[in-house]
Image (cartoon, grey):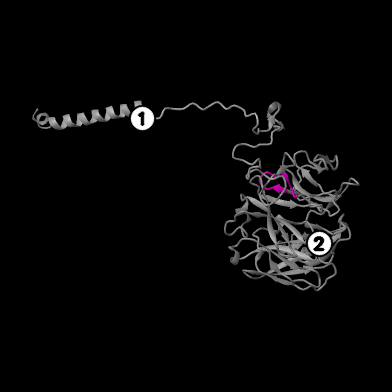
Amino acid sequence: MNFFSRYKKIFLILGFLILVALIAYLLWSLFFSPSPTTPAAVTPSETGGGLPIAGPGGEITGQATTTGGLPGTSGAPSPNEPSQVASGGITQTTPLTPRPITNPTLSKNGGVQYYNPGDGLFYQIDKNGNAVALSDKVFHNVQNVVWAPTKDKAIIEYPDGNKILYNFQTKQQVTLPAHWEDFSFSPTSGQIVSKSLGLDPENRWLMVSSDDGSQAKTLENIGTNDKTVYPAWSPNNQIVAMYTQGVDFNRQEVFFVGLNGENFKSTIIEGRGFEGQWSTTGDRLLYSVYSTDTNLNPQLWIVDATADTIGQERRGIGLSTWADKCTFASNTEVYCAVPESLEKGAGMFPELADKTKDNLYRINLETGAKELIAIPSGAYNISQIMVPASDNYLYFTDKKTNQLYQVRLR
């Protein structure tokens, strides 16, 4: 009792203050708080612009006849809307196959032909975008396909090691030895170079034969070095393969092999992890390597590589990507898929780049100029890129979906 008597005045004052605050809040709510507003009805303008007219099912069938745009716009497309033609920004990317495909290549007519693992058939995309079967023969469970430059035949490899050469024009097939690996066709498609890998290292050879496996002859004994031997028949018919030897951690020496035991010069390259690709006439070699100077990430280089010019005019291109993500559209123009970013060590461990997003670049080998031509409208990890001689379209496959896509260049 003494406690409440002693603090009675304090309780009365606190109660009074709370009552005043409550009355003040009620007065503010009644007279000063903003009342909610109802949106005004929008009446169509008789002279203003309109949106495109939607037809049945929401399909856009036309456009309002007035010329004005939405308020605050000039009628131009949004900057984030994909461009229909590659011009350096986000570019419309069109899928050409609804399902995964394997080993696409350019066809004679500038389209694309490929193997469809879903039904075991080979197809070619015609000028109207339709997939037409190259043959009615079914090939089950194909693991890899190596196309001849003439595009009318291919070496077909199976998971059990069996290999056949199939001619799509004559419908004939020939079985090749299972211990032959890493094929490359001659420019006329009549011969192949490969590695013959016997169980005994003394019986492992770089060899050349007719495309049906006949008339085989050995070129070089490769012993236990088969991983650093690269069959790659040059378009000018001078060189059929390359092999590398380490100089130190950041350098390799590249050797060139001809058909007749030629004593070609070698060249030193600044890096490891060599991947090479011939230019269309075979006078240049585009390659990628990694080193500690590049955070162990791949860098592109170009070097002269005819019999008389090996090692000359070597220079870095300044793009961090792999040579197998590039293609020659002509002898002086290269298109490449370049990752937006790479983790350190991706050159040594390419799986680090399996989830990167790639953009498309064009390189002029005469001037050294390189430009971003397209940011595909999707997060694609590009595994193969193709550009026909017409230079109208660029085709690529996505590593995640294994589907084929198209980007317009013109």
Q: Residue at x 44, y 27 (%)?
A: 36
Amino acid type for the residue under numbered disc 2: Trp
**SS of the residue under disc 1:** loop
Q: Which mark is residue 233?
A: 2
Regarding residue 391, the answer to whether it shows in the image is yes
- 407 is within the stretch colored magenta: yes
Left or right: residue 345 versus residue 382 is left
- Expressed as whole percent of the image width and height from the top left, the position of residue 198 reads 76, 60
Vertical side of 56 occupied by 300: above or below: below
How far is the residue under mark 1 from the one under mark 2? Answer: 86 Å
Vertical side of 320 occupied by 90: above or below: above
Quadrant in which the N terminus is drawn: top left
Mark 1 or mark 2, earlier in chain: 1
- Expressed as whole percent of the image width and height from the top left, the position of residue 5 reads 9, 29
Q: Which mark is residue 288?
A: none
Amino acid type for the residue under numbered disc 1: Phe
Q: Which residues are magenta?
A: 396-409
Vertical side of 314 occupied by 167: above or below: above
> Which mark is nearer the camera, 1 or 2?
1
Residue marked by disc 1: 32
In the rendered image, the residue lying farthest to the left is: 2
